[in-house]
Every structure is written in C-alpha cells, then in structure tokens.
Image (tube, grey):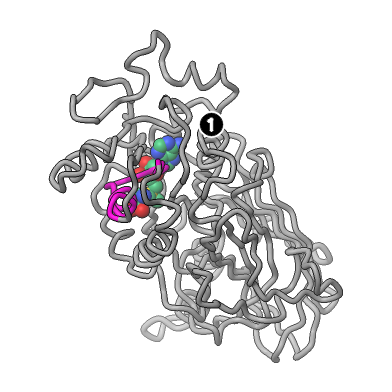
Amino acid sequence: MYPSSGHTNGYHDQQQQQPEQQRFVTTAQRPRVRRGPRGGGGGGVRSRDYGDGFRVSGEDNSQPPSQQAEQQNLAPCTDFDKAYFHSYAHVGIHEEMIKDRVRTDTYRSAILQHQRHIEGKVVMDVGCGTGILAIFCAQAGAKRVYAVDASDIAVQANEVVRANNLSDRIIVLHGRVEDVEIDEEVDVIVSEWMGYMLLYESMLGSVITARDRWLKPGGLILPSHATLYMAPITHPDRYTESIDFWRNVYGIDMSAMLPLAKQCAFEEPSVETINGENVLTWPHVVKYVDCYTLQIYELESVTTRFQFKSMMRAPFHGFAFWFDVEFNGPANVNANAQILLPGSPNPPSLDGVVKKKRTNPSDMLILSTAPEDPPTHWQQTLIYFYEPMEVEQDQVIEGSLTLSQSKENRRFMNIHLEYSSGGRSFVKESVMR
Ligand SMILES: C[S@@+](CC[C@H](N)C(=O)[O-])C[C@H]1O[C@@H](n2cnc3c(N)ncnc32)[C@H](O)[C@@H]1O
C-alpha cells in the first residue's frame, strides 16, 4: 500500500459539531483486494530489443522516456506511477481480470461486433497486460496491433503473442503510451482502463493521450463512452456485522469498541457487492465520459450536485457508486441510451437522476457494474456514514460530490461528499488509495 497522502479523513455534523475525541481521523482500513496499486518499486522501461517485434520505449533516443514526455507536456512518470506499473507485473491481478467473464466476454463481443472497423486495420491496445485484447483484435483480422504496456507484464505478453504465432501482426511495446513512439497512425484504440468508481487509477488520461497522438480522424475507440452513477443505499446487514457485533461479544459489553469499529469500517470507500434491494432511489449520473471528445484536464476534478427522493422508509447507510461503459462508433454517440432526466428529457444533460434504467438494444453493447447486473471484479464502491440516518418514503436527500485526483499521487482519488436530509447536514471526506 502507498503511504498516506496526508489527507485527513474527517466527518462532522454541521449542526452539531462532535466533541474532539469523537472525530475520526486517518487510520489504515482493513486490507482490501485491489486490482490497482499494491505498492512496490521498480518499473524501469529502458531495456533491450528482443528482435521479434518486442520493443522497449526510449531505446533509440538519447533522453529517458519521462524527459521526452515532459517536453511534450505529457504526464511525467513518477515513482507512484512506477509502483503502479509494478503492481501490474503480478499474475494474480491479470488472472482476476481475465476470469471476470462479464468483463472479458463483453470486450471480445465488442471487438467482434466492430470487426468491419478492425479487419485489415491498425489497432493500438493501450495497457495490453497479458495481451488478451490485442489477440482478440488480431483474431478479428487486424493488420497490425501495437500492444503497449509499461508494466513488466509486457514481457509475458510478448511470449503469449509468440506462442500463438502472432508476432508478425502484434508488436508489443514495453513502455508508457506517453513515452513510446510508433511511426504510423492507428484506426482503432482498445483499452480496459476502468478503475473502481470508474476514475480510480487515473488510466483514462493515458487513453486520451494515445487518441491525441495516433488515432486517425473518425477512428474507433473501444469502449467509447462511460458513465459513473451514485445512489443512496441501505445496508443493515453490513452495519450489524461490522458494528453491532461489538455490543455483545460472548456476553461481554464491548461497546467501547464502537468508535474504532466505525472508523476502521467506514472511514474510506469500501469495495463490495450489494444488490438492487440495497438501493433506495434511482441513480444519479455523476459523470458521463465521451472518449472521443474528453480532454485530460476534465479528469482532474469532477463535481456534481444531486437530489434524490427515497423510495422507501429505511435506515440510510451511505452511497453506492458504479459505472457502465458502451462500445459505440464516433458517429453513434449514445443514440440508443434511454436516460430520462427530470426537467430535461431531450437532449439529456447527462448529469442528473436516471429515471429509467438504460435499455440495451441489440446494436449497443454495455459493460455494466450495476448492483442489479451480474457481478464483476469491480463490484460496487460504497461510502458508508459513521451513523445511519432514518429516512421516510419520499424524503429528499441532497448534496454535492467532488472527486479529484490527489495532488500527491494522481492515482489516488479524493472524495468530498456533502449531504443533507431531514434538516441535518454532513460532510464526509475520504480517499480512495
Ligand atoms: C486493467 S489492466 C488491463 C490489461 C489487459 N488489457 C486486459 O484487458 O486484461 C491495465 C493495464 O494497463 C497498463 N497501463 C496503465 N497505464 C499505462 C500507460 N500509461 N502506459 C502503458 N501501460 C499502461 C497497466 O500496466 C496494466 O497492465
């Protein structure tokens, strides 16, 4: 795990300030399995030419790759980035992703569905990992695939490519997309860049960099669009399991443990699976991303205001976040998504409460991580309150949310949540690290 960013996670009721000793401050949460950073060092990208299409960035240049990136105004490769890439050298992380059939099958279907754009064309796989998506593209008839990864997993990707007799069509580039050089434009970019809460890991900026460097006008990006959602949730079982448990332990009153238990369980976002019954309202669209037009600076900070009406009387335990991605061509911008927003049904502002579940017409593929859909390795991300709040049916829950890249390590995400309901207001700060 990375060292703390120094960000203080706090919580206070704006009406009734808590006494100092009851405020919760930063402490480590129980370990979570993350597909993202696991710490560590290494990750150097200058190496040798393997002579079979495997190339390493910077090898023909007199400057180190990061210096080239800085000169081109691209993000320099920090020690945090090196640790991030190092985390992707573990086999386990790739096993987890590839075994996620919802994820991998949807990518394969999307590649096959767009075969006419891929056949005989040049493709770039941004962050190829083991090379699986690059190979799907070669199987779909791509003339050439540049499979780029800054992690040492690129060495294995090259072995996999060679073992499948695809070295003549797949060129594995071991380096950051910000640093590698290719001498042609590409027709298609494919990438699996989504982190927890969609934006965690901050990999999307690298896909945008690749788009701006190499994608031909009118080229295809898979996935093309992404939407991050949030909704209030009730989760009494989780609260009972982690908190109420301490009230009576083998007949002993251990309630003194409650503040620590709440702090440890609920201070930081928690990645876990919920289902549709935990969700109290229709979701709100936090951010809609069009990969064809998005600019990198837009990812530094995302702010949204929300207003929900609880559909039932229930204890309100926090908010859940999930996302979906779509696989459309550039001209087919969200043409089939049925998102109806209050007050602005057509065209949708794409920043509001979703009144109707998206439909999935046969010509539009969606990879969804919603609670009501089949589970994925992303699960859902939950931000719990330290104390649940009772809400009545139709009670309004409103507030604002800001997600921002940590200044210290842009792979981390700072979460500033303000919410109020029933005349009480709260602020919760947390960090996804
Ligand atoms: C989520 S994994 C996806 C791996 C593979 N495409 C798959 O679908 O199984 C993301 C990969 O992107 C790589 N990556 C992230 N940012 C990158 C960058 N800027 N340049 C090159 N590789 C990057 C990581 O090292 C990691 O292997």
Rendered-image quarter of ligand 1: top left
Which residue is the extreme one toward the left?
163
Q: Is 323 displayed left or right of 354 in the figure?
A: left
- Within-10-Å neighbours for mark 1: few <14, some 14–19, many 20+: some
The span picked out in magenta is 122-139
Residue 215 place in picture, x, y as percent:
52, 38
Q: SS at mark 1?
A: helix
What's the amino acid at mark 1? Arg
Does residue 58 appear in this view?
yes
User: In percent of the image, x 54 and y 66: which residue is there?
Assistant: 324
Rendered location of residue 12, percent (x, y) = 73, 60
Give the quarter of the image for residue 267.
bottom right
* Residue bearing mark 1: 213
Q: Is residue 204 above or below residue 64?
A: below
240 or 406, which is in the foreground? 406
Q: Is mark 1 within 8 Å of ligand 1?
A: no
